Image (spheres, rainbow, N blue to C red):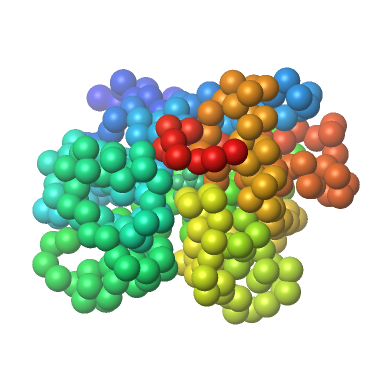
Amino acid sequence: MPLEVVIKGLRFETSSARGVWKYKLMLPVKKEVEPVSLGEGDTPLIPLKSHKRLFVKFEGANPTGSFKDRGMTLAVTIAKYIGAKSVVVASTGNTSASAAAYAAKAGLECLVYLPRGSVARGKLFQALLHGAKVVEVDGNFDEALEEVIARYVDNTQGHVYPLNSVNPWRLEGQKTIAFEIYQQLGFVPENVVVPVGNAGNIYAIWKGFRELREVGVTDRAPRMIGVQAEGASPVFKTWLAKADELLPVERPYTVATAIKIGRPVNWLKALTAVRESNGFMLSVSDATILEALKTLARSEGIGVEPASAAPLAGYRVALEQGLIGQDETTVLVATGHALKDPEVRF
Ligand SMILES: *Cc1c(COP(=O)(O)O)cnc(C)c1O
C-alpha cells in the first residue's frame, strides 16, 4: 500500500517511487494507474562557480537525456492505461527520442514525424535505436506537427495516441521540475530561466510553482524568464508587441534545433506564465548561445546541447540590462544533454 507523506505541504508517495512519481499525489492520476517509468527526474541542481546565486538544473541527466522524459512517463502511462496500441508524435528530436524509449518500455508501437535535415544526430539515433518508425517530413517542425494533427488528432484514426505538447499529461509531468527546484534549494528562487520552443515547458514549470503556492507550501513564486533564439523568436516578438495573436516566424533558423519553431502551439500558455509571474522574454543570438555552451562545458563541466545554453546567454543579457540582479537566486534550466548534438560547431 503506498504511504502518503506530506512535508511542508508537498505530498509524496513513498512506496518505492522516485523522481517524477514520488509526486504522484500532486499529479491528476488515479491511484491504481501503474507508472511506465525509466527513473526520470531527480536531476542535479548544480551551483555555478561564476556567479554566487546561479544554479543549473541539469535535465540532461534524465534517462534519454532531456526533460521530455518527465512528461513522457505520464503521457505513455496514460496511453497504456486507456488501451492504446501505438503512439505518434512530431518532434524537433528530443520528444521522439523520449517517446520511442517509453513506448518500448510500455510495449507500444511508436511513430515519429521529424523535419528532414533539422534533427540533431543523437536524437534521430535514439528514435531508431528504440525501434520507432520514423517518417521524415519535407518541411520544418511546424509542418511536421500539422501533418500529425491532420492525420491523427482531428481525424481520430483508431487507437493511435498523440503525444505532442498539446497533450496535457506531458505538462503535468514537467511541472515536477518546479517541485524539485524548491526542494533542492529549500526555497523558491527569484528567477527561473527557460529556453522556449513549442513553449510548453515554461508554462509547466510555472504551473508547478503556482501549485506550491496553492497548497500553501510557500507564498512566493519566481519570475519566469523565457529565452528564444533570434532567428526563431515568435513568443519574444509577440510578448514585445503586446499582441493578442501570435506573430509567427515563417522560416525559423537557429543552431539550437530543439527551439527552432516558428509557430509554437503553446505560445499563449508561455505568455501567461511570463505575465502572471512578472517575468519577461528575451531573444539571444546563436553566437551568444554557443559562447554560453562553451562556458558551461569548459568552466563548469556541464555539457549541454545548444538550446539548453540559451538560458545562460539570456541571463548574461538580463544582468547587463539590469533586468535581474547578481544578488537574486536564479535557476537556469539546462534542458538537454551535450551528446544529443555532437555535430555542433563552436
Ligand atoms: C523541447 C526542448 C526545448 C523546448 O521546450 P518547449 O516546451 O517546447 O518550449 C528546449 N530545449 C530542449 C533540449 C528541448 O528538447
- Does 95 sit above or below residue 328? below
Left or right relative to 334: residue 67: left
Which image quarter: residue 164?
Answer: bottom left
What x and y, as percent, mark residue 290? 63, 41
| Residue depicted at x 64% and y 79% | 244
Q: Determine the residue located farthest toward the right in the rendered image.
A: 322
| Residue depicted at x 48% and y 27% | 43
**Residue placed most toward the observer, 250 or 104:** 250
Quadrant housing the C terminus: top right
- Does 96 sit above or below residue 7? below
Left or right relative to 244: residue 130: left
Quadrant housing the N terminus: top left
What x and y, as percent, mark residue 176? 48, 38
Label tally = 0
Which image quarter: residue 13?
Answer: top left
**Residue placed most toward the observer, 304 or 52:** 304
What x and y, as percent, mark residue 57? 57, 31
| Residue depicted at x 72% and y 30% | 54
Can see residue 45?
A: no
- Does 16 sit above or below residue 112? above
Q: Determine the residue located farthest toward the front in the rendered image.
A: 345
Can see residue 345?
A: yes
What x and y, as percent, mark residue 243? 68, 77
Left or right relative to 324: residue 138: left
| Residue depicted at x 36% and y 39% | 122
